[in-house]
Amino acid sequence: MVWSDQIQVEDEETFATLFQQYKNLVFKTAYLMLGNAADAEDALQEVFLSVHCSLNTFDPSRAAFTTWLYRITVNHCLNRRRKRNILELPLGDVQGHHPSPESQIMKDQALEQLLNSLSDKLRAVVVLRYYADLPYADIGEILDVPLGTVKSRLSQALCNMRKSLGVSMEEEGVLVADAICHQEDVQ
C-alpha cells in the first residue's frame, strides 16, 4: 500500500494495515537504537500510538511517509536512551537467530561494543545509514540536520570506530581520512 495523499486513517482496519506494513521498520530501528527486544517492542507500540495521534499532521509534500516514521522512531528512541542510559546492544537477536560460528559471535560483540561507544547522535547516523540503508538526504530530514552534518557525523563515527578497533587507515591506503581523524584528536 502506498501512502501518497494525505493519509486518512478513520477505521481500525486501515490503521492495522499501516501497522503491519511498517512494524518491522520501526522495530528494527528501535532495536538497534535501544539495544533489546523488550524496549524495542515498547517503542514500537509507543511510536504507533504517536503516529495514530499525529497522523493528521503528516504532510506528504514535505517528506515521504517512511522518512516521517523514521523521524518519530529515532526521536522516541533518543529520548528513551537519554532517560534510561541503555548500554547494551545484542545484535545477534536482530536477525532472529543467534549466529553459531565463533567468529560471527566475536564480530557481533565487537560491533556491539563499537556502537555502544558512540554518542547518541553518531549512533543514530550509523544505524540509519548502514542498517536502514538510507541516503544521506533522508537521514538529514529524519534527524533535522543539514546534509553536511550527516556526513561529518558519519565520518566522525567511522573514525571513532576505526580507532577503537585499532585499524590503521594507512594500512588501508586512506591517508587523507587518517589525517582528518588525527586532526580531530588535536582539536
Image (cartoon, rainbow, N blue to C red):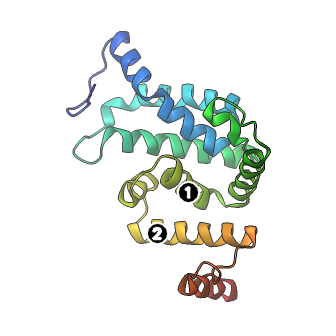
Question: What residue lies at 63% left-to-right and 56% top-to-bottom?
Answer: 120
Q: Which circle marks residue 151 in the picture?
A: 2
User: Which residue is denoted by mark 1 in the rendering?
Assistant: 126
At a point 37% along the width and 39% down the height, the residue shown is 66
Quarter of the figure with residue 88: top right
Residue 176's place in the image compared with 132, above or below, is below
Residue depicted at x 43% and y 62%: 145
The picture places residue 71, in percent across and down from the top left corner, at: 45, 45
Q: Position of residue 51 (x, y in %)?
A: 43, 30
- Considering the numbered disc 2 on the image, is that residue within a helix, a strand or a loop? helix
| Nearer to us in this view, 42 or 35 | 35
Residue 88 at least partly seen: no
Q: In this rendering, does residue 23 appear at all?
A: yes
Quadrant for the C terminus in the image: bottom right
Location of residue 120 with respect to 14 vertically, above or below: below
Disc nearer the start of the sequence (2/1): 1
Secondary structure type for disc 1: helix
176 sits left or right of 111 in the view: left
Quarter containing the N terminus: top left
Amino acid under label 2? Lys
> How many numbered marks, from 0 up?
2
Q: Give the amino acid type for the residue marked by disc 1 in the picture.
A: Val
